């Protein structure tokens, strides 16, 4: 599944406009490339720089562009429970099949606060919901024990675990209800996450190399390890170098070099620093992507 970028125009500015024609083209690109689902307006989609109205409008436009051709998951997390409920309702109204809810960032809730927050959203909006744990960005860590408690809520169906800690797969399996879905949120460890029993990934790399990521994950899930590792080796540079600066700075630069979008990003994010251009260009070349 791709953690989709939100293409913008106008370079670096506080209010770079969303480029809807390019957004439609990106959705077509992923459908043609075999991407299994689109995750819209998450971290990679610059959810933090869109206001609530824009966030909901981008979700509606993506649903209209996709027109039922590919499963859609909406990023609807927020550090306010009320705002998370509002965004999740908007996603359900727009026709999304599920929502991805990042843990409330910055305010550093307790484990009980995390449990009550996600429980409140799940009870308020009857739509399948996926937890999203990325402590490197949120300053809070949804522990496996708390995920296990939340897995007992019927419409909380899985977790995106982005710590890169592969020991968490077995821990989550032991604590969560049967059938609870485990998705990697760390491209560099996705292959081993799937081999350890995970069900897939929500990927930044898939923006640039969707078909290769789909094939690698499918092969890993089928136990064809050598073939999966061969593809993953080609993608290793992207897994690493799309994070030389804060996501989505490098991936938007890469997508612009690929001709998939214009240069556009919202402050306080900036365009990729010149000293990293060759690094990301080489990672694209290693993956077989001409720029």
Image (spheres, helix red, strand yellow):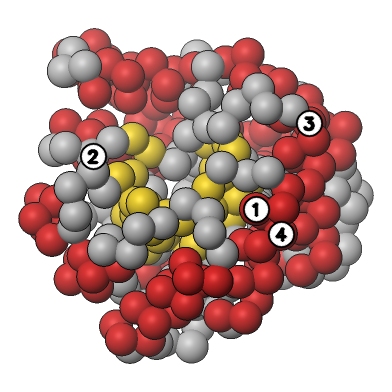
Q: Earlier in the sequence, mark 2 or mark 4?
A: 4
Classify residue 236 by image quadrant. Answer: top left
Q: Nearer the viewer, residue 232 or 37?
A: 37
**Residue occupied by mark 2:** 198
Q: CA distance from mark 2 to mark 3?
A: 30 Å
Q: Position of residue 100 (x, y in %)?
A: 50, 55
Q: Quadrant of the C terminus?
A: top right
At 46% from the left and 56% from the top, the residue drawn is: 129
Q: Quadrant of residue 265?
A: bottom right
Residue that carries the numbered disc 1 in the rendered image: 92
Q: If you read the primary sequence from the N terminus, does the residue marked by circle 2 or circle 3 appear first?
A: 3
Q: Is residue 12 above or below residue 228?
A: below
Q: CA distance from mark 2 to mark 1?
A: 26 Å
Q: Secondary structure at mark 3?
A: helix
SS state under label 2: loop
Direction from residue 109 to residue 176 in the image, left or right:
left
Mark 3 neighbour density, 10 Å: few (under 14) some (14–19) many (20 or more): some
């Amino acid at each position: 599944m791709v953690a989709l970028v939100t293409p913008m125009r106008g370079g670096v500015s506080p209010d770079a406009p969303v480029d809807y024609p390019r957004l439609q083209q990106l959705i077509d690109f992923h459908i043609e490339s075999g991407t299994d689902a689109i995750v819209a307006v998450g971290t990679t989609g610059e959810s933090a720089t869109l206001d609530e109205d824009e966030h909901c409008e981008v979700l509606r436009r993506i649903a209209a562009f996709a027109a039922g051709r590919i499963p859609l998951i909406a990023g609807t997390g927020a550090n306010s429970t009320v705002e998370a409920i509002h965004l999740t309702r908007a996603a359900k109204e727009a026709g999304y099949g599920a929502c991805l809810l990042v843990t409330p960032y910055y305010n550093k809730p307790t484990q009980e606060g995390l449990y009550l927050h996600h429980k409140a959203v799940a009870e308020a909006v009857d739509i399948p919901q996926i937890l999203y744990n990325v402590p490197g960005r949120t300053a809070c860590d949804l522990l496996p024990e708390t995920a296990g408690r939340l897995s007992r809520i019927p419409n909380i169906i899985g977790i995106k675990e982005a710590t890169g800690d592969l020991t968490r797969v077995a821990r989550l399996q032991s604590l969560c209800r049967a059938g609870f879905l485990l998705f990697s949120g760390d491209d560099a460890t996705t292959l081993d996450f799937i081999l350890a029993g995970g069900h897939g990934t929500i990927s930044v790399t898939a923006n640039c190399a969707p078909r290769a990521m789909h094939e690698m994950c499918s092969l890993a899930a089928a136990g064809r390890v050598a073939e999966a590792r061969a593809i993953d080796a080609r993608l290793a540079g992207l897994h690493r170098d799309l994070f030389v600066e804060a996501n989505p700075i490098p991936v938007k630069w890469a997508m612009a070099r690929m001709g998939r979008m214009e240069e556009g990003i919202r402050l306080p994010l900036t365009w990729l620093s010149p000293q990293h251009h060759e690094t990301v260009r080489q990672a694209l070349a290693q993956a077989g992507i001409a720029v």
